[in-house]
Amino acid sequence: MDALLTALADPARWRLVTLLAERPRPVGVLARLAEARQPQTTKHLQTLERAGVVVSQRTGQRRVYALRPGALRDLAAVLSGLADTADRAGGPLETYERYGIGLHAERLAAEDAGWADGRSFRFLRSLTGRPELVWRHLTETSLLARWWTPDGLRVSELAFEARPGGRIIHEYRDAEDADGSEPVAGRAEGVVDDARPGEHLAYRLSPLLPDGGIAFTAHVDLDLRPTGTGTGTGTGTDLDVHWRITDSTVDSADFIAGIEIGFGQSLDRLAATLAADVRRTDDTDTRSTK
């Protein structure tokens, strides 16, 4: 495929491909139609032939070239597959475009300090597992690190002291930045206000601007209630999350535009993580009783 793409990338060779799509032609005719010298045309055709795009045969004193449609159809299928992958419903491209729309709107609204103060967001999730298990995933750093970032990111530094006055540090990088050579994607610092295990968690978290200043402060309240509809452990948990914005700066627009999408993705990862953990526990218990 690389040889095919390289062969087709040259405008002169692409012109020859379009001429041969009409009908097979000899080298001399192709050179004249392409307004090129015959030696150059021959070299281009040889490159195309090596890449499997054209085929040739000698007829008397002439060498006639013809297009091999299969190579182009194979390329078209690959390109179509790439386009379908990027354009799938609910995929990363759709999220990227939705974020772009929100980003534009928030930047227009961010005219003065305090522009987003009082803005609130609410997230509801029905989770697998008892509130005690969900609480652990909300407060224990080893479990938090498994879900507390949007898609495509990974936690690179994390502290969460689940007690009133406890500190919070949340830093994240691109998931594919394995060696930490790229700039940090985001960092936030905060403090826990309230921690009632299995029931209620409240904290303040401030994303930091590149210069270290505060973009805004998020006041986050998480309420946990047993649902009794979960599997495995015999109960589930309804998680109700409220965000409230204060101290918003003009430069906070890019951060605020991503709250609904980003934290929503994080909670979806939490739900998937809990479901997998409970399922794994159920499988282990089932095997141990056999």
Image: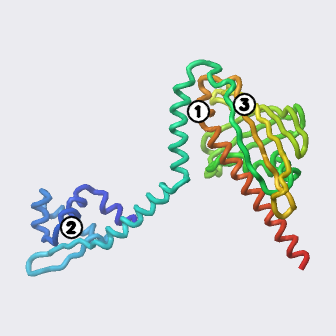
How many other residues sit within 10 Å of disc 3, few (<14), some (14-19) or many (≥20)?
some
Estimate the spatial distance between the alpha carbons at disc 3 and disc 1, rounded to whole Å: 16 Å
**Residue depicted at 82% across the width and 41% down the height:** 223
Dividing the picture into quadrants, the one containing residue 209 is top right
Q: Is residue 146 above or below residue 19?
A: above
Position of the N terminus, as image quadrant, is: bottom left
Q: Is residue 44 left or right of residue 28?
A: right
Q: Is residue 29 left or right of residue 172?
A: left
Residue at image mark 3 = 244
Q: Is residue 135 left or right of residue 151?
A: right
How many other residues sit within 10 Å of disc 1, few (<14), some (14-19) or many (≥20)?
some
Judge whether residue 124 can be spotted in this image: yes
Q: According to the image, what is the colour scheme of the structure?
A: rainbow
Q: Is residue 263 above or below residue 287?
A: above
Mark 2 or mark 3, earlier in chain: 2
Q: Position of residue 84 (x, y in %)?
A: 46, 59
Estimate the spatial distance between the alpha carbons at disc 2 and disc 1, rounded to whole Å: 49 Å
Q: Position of residue 214 (x, y in %)?
A: 69, 26
Residue at image mark 2 = 21
Judge whether residue 142 can be spotted in this image: no
Mark 2 or mark 1, earlier in chain: 2
Q: Quick one: 214 or 279, which is closer to the camera?
A: 279
Q: Position of residue 218 (x, y in %)?
A: 73, 31
Q: Is residue 110 above or below residue 233?
A: above
Q: Position of residue 247 (x, y in %)?
A: 70, 23
